Image (cartoon, rainbow, N blue to C red):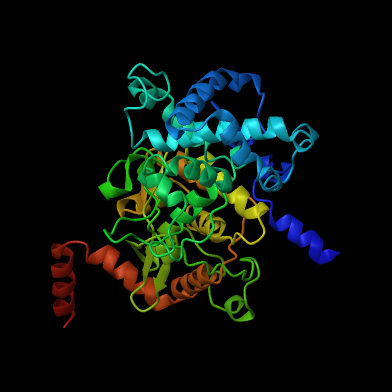
Amino acid sequence: MGSWVVEVQATKSIYKVPPFISKTNKTAYKPRLVSFGPYHHGDPQLAWMEAHKKRAHLCFINRSGRNEQEVYDIVAEKAQDLKDSYDSLDSKWQDNTEIFVQMMILDGCFMFEVLHVSQHYDYYSDYDPVFGPHGNAHVMHLIKADMLLLENQLPMLLLRMLIGILRKNEEPALPLQLLDPKPDKFPQMGKCLHVLDLYRKGLLQPCNEHGNAAPQSANQGEGDPKMGKYLHKLHLCWKRLLHPHNKLGYAVQNQTEENNKTVGHNVLRPATELHQAGVSFKISKGLQDISFDVDCGVLKLPNFLVEDLTESIFLNIIAFERCHVGSGSGFTSFVAFMDCIVDDSEDIKLLSSNGIIDNFIGTDKEAAELFNTLAKDLIISTDELLKVYEDLINYSNKRRNKWRANLIQTYFKNPWAIVSVIAAFFNLN
């Protein structure tokens, strides 16, 4: 009986955020413009987007060369699998397959078109309020942000079916090929459950072959032009292959006896204090490339951007990792680690000066408060980050490292200070 329950639960991947997670920021999990899937369907504040969904649906049907009944029949074959993706499905959807499938098709076609239109602009009029230039400037970034909410996901199975419906009539755009990667090109991509999961895995990838750090601005269009404009706007770093090794380690609070006996503190200090103890900061290749070199005192952290949408995106990724058994905790551990080394505005300023944080959210104080809020109730639970955590404590507790750092930072910042020290030495003799 127990194994059967686990097997059923393993099919779930789209969750309503439980109160113990959402209590700190309820609005971060709610869509602002458009609903995808059953959880927010029918919300009066999102109703105005339904007409735009219908227009996108008709455009998709016309391009597919199939009629609506054919599309319905294809999706209906997998209706139960689609239902099983939702952790909490009301009887309205569970007992009425017809309206559930219709909703899946309408929402799926709209999401598909959002993905597709970034590569093909000739399907819609320049005066289209969503897919035209005006919509691209004013609403599309908010729609894409709504696509990264845990409660607003569509199963990746649905998007793959929609790709298959079009495949006979046209070559899919690059983002759509990558929704269903070919094993020879992406052997380690792994199964992506939905767009949020895909986005999360993209952030956890190492640097791509061009040397760009994984997390980039949601508004940037730089990098590899083959990746496409849309991919950069949503950080969908498709070519950064995932190496899942997020084994559950020990909670940060449970330090070893050896660490407790260390002279000094046994809690990781903020970045400014680490710097005073001799730690320097450099940019790593990505979130899974965080390391600390105990020989030279270099802590490598990924470059990432902090902006208006960062809080919502990060909270939803964290919520997914906390809800979904087997997802790992790589991103959650990263946020918890950053909270350890970010205490106030001075820490943000230091990390920004070393290229780690690009702060577009406002003041350094606001950025620091963001990390303090994001990491509430979180712990570091990956072996790799726990080792970095412990190595930093041990390094910063050694007096010779503090002395050397103080000497360098106080006297050797400019050549005249060095001359003064040497002169003083000779005068003593």
Asked if residue 204 lies left or right of residue 426, the reply is right
Number of residue marks: 0
* Above/below status of 302 relative to 55: below
| Residue 426: percent from left, percent from top | 14, 79
Which residue is pictured at 49% across the width and 56% down the height? Answer: 201
Front one among 380 and 27: 27
* Above/below status of 290 relative to 195: below
Which residue is pictured at 30% across the width and 55% down the height? Answer: 212
| Residue 413: percent from left, percent from top | 22, 62
> Does residue 235 appear anywhere in the picture?
no
| Residue 150: percent from left, percent from top | 60, 42
Asked if residue 313 lies left or right of residue 96, the reply is left
Outermost residue to the right: 1
- In terms of image quadrants, where is residue 114? top left
| Residue 271: percent from left, percent from top | 43, 58
> Does residue 161 appear anywhere in the picture?
yes
Front one among 195 and 355: 195
Which residue is pictured at 74% across the width and 39% down the height? Answer: 89
- In terms of image quadrants, where is residue 128? top left
Q: On the rendered image, what quadrant is the N terminus found in?
A: bottom right
Q: On the rendered image, what quadrant is the C terminus found in?
A: bottom left
Front one among 162 and 283: 162
